[in-house]
Structure formats: C-alpha cells, structure tokens
C-alpha cells in the first residue's frame, strides 16, 4: 500500500525521515538488509528515482551502506544510531516544550501532566 506524503515538501526528504525513524525504532536493525530500490519504491508508491535519491541521502549520512553485489544494508555503527536517536529526542522535547510554553503551560503544570500521563491517568 502506498504511503501518504505531504505535497508541500519533497517526497524523497519525507522518505528519508521515515526510514530514519525505522532505523531509530529498530524496525530496520543494524546490519539489516534493505529490499531493492524497486521493491521499496513500489511499497511506498513512488518512482524508483525518488527512492534512489532518498537512499543516496541516507548513505551520505552514514545510515545506509551499499555492497556492490549484495545490496544495501543499515549501518552496524550503533554509536551513530544512538547519537541520532539522542539528537532526535532532544529536538522533539525542545519542540514540545516550546509549544506547551506557547499555550501557557508552566513547568509545574508540564511536570504534573507528564506524571499523570506516565501513570496512565491522562
């Protein structure tokens, strides 16, 4: 089934983000093989050239490596994956805190909200 993409942003960039998320979540494990460009493109409902561009970006960033006769693989560099996971979490938290500040939440209110949520009360 084809994925849904935001028409206001380049599709290849959205594919990069989604594939990074799969690496960070472990859905694509370190050292794991990726399907062919054509298969990945078909699954996403995009042109193979778009998928190739996304994979080239991931390779530039060090998250994907290509072996000439064997295909593409997720990096085995778990330190890189952990660093990316930490940076992504930091960005998400900073964005969350900024948005909560914009709607008038105080640090104490945020703490109470998070505590209630983690206890299953929210």
Image: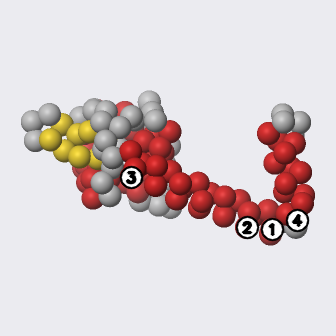
N-term-proximal mark, 1 vs 4: 1
Residue in view at x 86 percent, y 49 percent: 113
Residue at the disc numbered 1? 101
Tell whether label 1 touches label 3 (CB within 8 Å): no
The quadrant holding residue 95 is bottom right
N-term-proximal mark, 4 vs 3: 3
Query: Taking the image as drawn, is residue 88 in sight?
Result: yes
Residue in view at x 15 percent, y 41 percent: 67
Q: Nearer the viewer, residue 45 or 70?
A: 70
Residue at the disc numbered 2? 98
Task: Look at the numbered disc 3 and give the secondary structure of its residue.
Answer: helix
Left or right, 73 with reference to 81:
left
Residue 119 circle label: none
Q: Nearer the viewer, residue 30 or 71?
A: 30
N-term-proximal mark, 2 vs 3: 3
Residue 106 circle label: 4
Residue in view at x 88 percent, y 65 percent: 106
Tell whether label 2 touches label 1 (CB within 8 Å): yes
Task: Look at the numbered disc 4 and give the secondary structure of its residue.
Answer: loop
Between the residue at mark 4 and the residue at mark 2, the CA separation in whole angstroms equals 11 Å
Tell whether label 3 touches label 2 (CB within 8 Å): no
């Amino acid at each position: 089934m084809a994925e849904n993409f935001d028409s206001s942003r380049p599709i290849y960039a959205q594919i990069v983000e989604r594939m990074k998320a799969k690496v960070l979540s472990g859905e694509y494990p370190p050292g794991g093989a990726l399907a062919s460009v054509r298969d990945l493109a078909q699954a996403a409902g995009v042109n193979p050239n778009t998928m190739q561009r996304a994979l080239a970006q991931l390779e530039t960033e060090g998250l994907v490596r290509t072996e000439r006769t064997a295909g593409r693989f997720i990096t085995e560099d778990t330190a890189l994956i952990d660093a990316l996971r930490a940076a992504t979490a930091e960005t998400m938290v900073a964005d969350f805190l900024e948005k909560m500040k914009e709607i008038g939440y105080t640090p104490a209110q945020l703490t109470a909200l998070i505590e209630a949520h983690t206890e299953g009360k929210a």
